[in-house]
Image (cartoon, grey):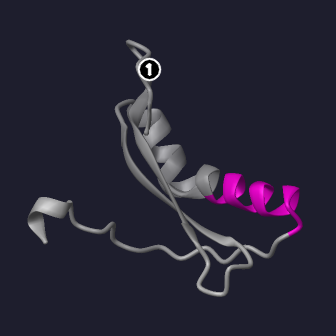
């Protein structure tokens, strides 16, 4: 898990990475769960109307796929519930 810890930052949150092997054994699936907050109203407006809330994360995933020469399919989904809630 990654977390922004800079005090006074205009945004913060956590990113949890989960990597699972592909069923055919030829690769892997990457799931990134973002729990972010945008504190500054200016940056919140930019995220909403200019680059989108998931723009940076989607760019990261496309660059990662490009690095390994793999196609990228981005799927927005609700995260899995914590194990104790299942």
Residue at coordinates 49% horizontally, 36% vertically from top-left?
Answer: 43
Label 1 SS = loop
| Residue 86 location (% of width, % of height) | 13, 72
The vertical placement of 36 against 73, above or below, is above
Within the image, what quadrant is residue 24 found in?
Answer: bottom right
Residue at coordinates 44% horizontally, 20% vertically from top-left?
Answer: 9
The vertical placement of 12 against 46, above or below, is above
Identify the image quadrant of the N terminus.
Answer: top left
What stretch of residues is rendered in magenta? 58-69
| Residue 53 location (% of width, % of height) | 50, 55
Of 39 and 2, which appears nearest the observer? Answer: 2
Residue highlighted by disc 1: 9
| Residue 56 location (% of width, % of height) | 63, 49
Within the image, what quadrant is residue 52 found in?
Answer: bottom right
Q: Is residue 63 magenta?
A: yes
Q: Residues within 10 Å of mark 1 (few under 14, many from 20)?
A: few
The rendered magenta stretch, by its main secondary structure, is classed as helix
Residue at coordinates 61% horizontally, 78% vertically from top-left?
Answer: 22
| Residue 60 location (% of width, % of height) | 69, 52
Q: Is residue 16 left or right of residue 71?
A: left
Number of numbered discs on residues: 1
């Amino acid at each position: 898990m990654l977390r922004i810890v800079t005090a006074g930052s205009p945004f913060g949150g956590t990113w949890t990475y989960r990597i699972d092997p592909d069923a055919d054994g030829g690769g892997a699936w990457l799931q990134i769960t973002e729990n972010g907050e945008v504190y500054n109203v200016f940056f919140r407006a930019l995220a909403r109307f200019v680059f989108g809330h998931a723009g940076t994360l989607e760019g990261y995933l496309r660059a990662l796929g490009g690095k390994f020469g793999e196609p990228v399919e981005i799927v927005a989904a609700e995260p899995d519930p914590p194990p104790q809630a299942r």
